[in-house]
Amino acid sequence: MDSSNKMSTLERGSSKHPNDETIISFENVDYSHPNGTAALKHVSLSVSRGELVAILGTNGAGKSTLVRHINALLKPTHGRVAVFGTDTKETTSATLSRKVGIVFQNANNQLFSDSVRSEIQFGLKNFGFSQALIDERTRWALDTFGLQQYADRPPMELSGGEKKRLCNALVLAWEPEILILDEPTVGQDSEQKEKLIEMIRTLQNQSRTVIVVTHDVEFIWPLQPRTVLMTAGKIIADGSAAEVFGSVEKMKEASVLLPQLVELFNSMRIAQYPANVFQAADQISQLAIGGT
Amino acid sequence: MQWIASGFLFVRGYSLIHRMDPRIRLFLAATLFIVGLLSQSVVELSVLIALCFVISLVAQIAKRFSKSLVFVGGLSFVVFLISVFLSHQSVTAGIINGLRLFEVIQATSIFFLTTTPDELEQVMRWFRLPIDFIMVFVIAVRFVPVLLMDAIQIMDAQRSRGLEFEKGSLIQRLKNTIPLLVPLIAVAVTRSLDLAEAMDARAYGALRRPSSMYVLAMRASDYASLLCFALGGALGLYIAFFLKLF
């Protein structure tokens, strides 16, 4: 892989989705917190319908601040953020959230109802769904996320993993066109992570736009998303997973560790990275056969 | 909410005021508070308010200090209206009541904006207050910004579920606070239990009077400041009691 070519495509954002219908666009966005700390600096980014985007970076890189602009929870200090063509400065987060669902990192910050069922219904009622539709979507969410047996229990009594599932369920219940998962793997065991990957793949098949904010590179690597790398409030790389993870200098600059498979293939000086262990086994066995 | 809290949350700084012994800072704030409380003159209260602004400039906290004053100014105006229209006092008395409230909040704000929770603890120890009381107070002060951040995150989460806190009648707005308050209380309780366990694990309560890493020590500049503030306070009280200013 030619390193110089790779860098230039990375910086301009080479991996645009073939649909090419831009539904999120950041135009030279700056954002400063009320205490004056600059959290985003000259960020430009566009996301097409149906894309799966991973936003990577260490703590304090500006990942969560970036996605909070997408449903107008934060408004840019300078520049423009447009979602489905609407400038976020001209709308409210409550309005935009009908199309942009965010699953926040901390489940305890979202749950307040006396039952799992009413927790799911809360958002649907706020968005003005009819009673029949509320019942239907609640049933769907309870079934899909395996929460039927907890339907009448208080959400606070659920385990950490169940709470996280409930948070996914209560957002997907209103079928937002864009789903943002903010650090979805924090506090999750490997089984839950597998289920999350399944859920993201299902949403991809439905042509939904999914944005995952994470620093868990092992979780995101098998999904092979378009990858946006951030550090100190800036986007320093934007491209396919292989391009971004293959750029060792950029990964070092962002202080993000490489996935183990990438490390392994880098140490073998092979630039064609496998997405999972099965592909890795195939590639290695082919190499072994070729070598004998 | 952030505006109100910003007037009382410590701002790290290295100004003349920050470098003073915290007991002197407390004395300064207490002097301003007491003189303001006893003053019956619009002129004297105005001078005290101006003095508070000057102190905030010297302490380099003017920006944060001014933020909370929008709310305090509104509150003072309400006090003025209550004094004039409900208590049927004169307009001058109403102005004095409003200015007095404004000034005493300013004085309190100066102390809290320039005093770290650690310094607060040392001052309370110096007053020989019970150690459990000190710990509860200091933890409460430390947790204000943490709870504020939690509240912001919870509000963001609920807004993302279509909730509009500012919409509807007064009753509806009160109802809208339930999705904020329930998780906030739950998070606060969980956090306090975690903290209690962590403190137990670090032998909190093993000694009746645990030692302290820092010991308060007055310097020559602190004694000079104390003298200045004492003279200023005495002058303020003299004016309040013996001079009939407007």
Image: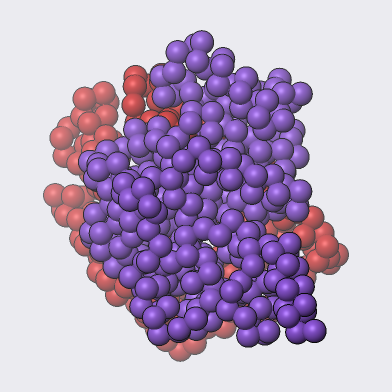
Chain colours: A purple, B red
Residue A241 versus residue B144: which sits nearer the camera?
Answer: A241
Question: Which x, y percent locates residue A266?
Answer: 63, 82
Question: Which x, y percent locates residue A41?
Answer: 32, 68
Is residue A46 rendered to the left or right of residue A200?
left
Is residue B79 rendered to the left or right of residue A142?
left
Q: Residue furthest top?
A: A132
Is residue A75 rendered to the left or right of residue A55?
left
Q: Mark yes or no: residue A246 visible.
A: yes
As drawn, A64 above or below A21: below
As drawn, A253 above or below A47: below
Q: Which residue lies at the image location 52% right of the left edge and 44% below the top edge?
A: A204
Q: Residue furthest right?
A: B206
As drawn, B155 above or below B66: above
Residue A142 quadrant: top right
Residue A90 versus residue A224: which sits nearer the camera?
Answer: A224
Residue A93 versus residue A21: which sits nearer the camera?
Answer: A21
Question: Which x, y percent locates residue A184?
Answer: 60, 51
Question: Which x, y percent locates residue A147?
Answer: 71, 28
Q: Which residue lies at the image location 37% right of the left edge and 66% below the top edge?
A: A14
As drawn, A288 above or below A274: below
Residue B55 quadrant: bottom left
Q: How many marks?
A: 0
Q: Mark yes or no: residue B10 visible.
A: no
Q: Which residue lies at the image location 40% right of the left edge and 32% below the top edge?
A: A98
Q: Residue furthest bottom?
A: B220
Residue B45 quadrant: bottom left
Q: Which residue lies at the image location 34% right of the left edge and 26% below the top edge?
A: B167
Quadrant holding the N terminus of chain B: top left
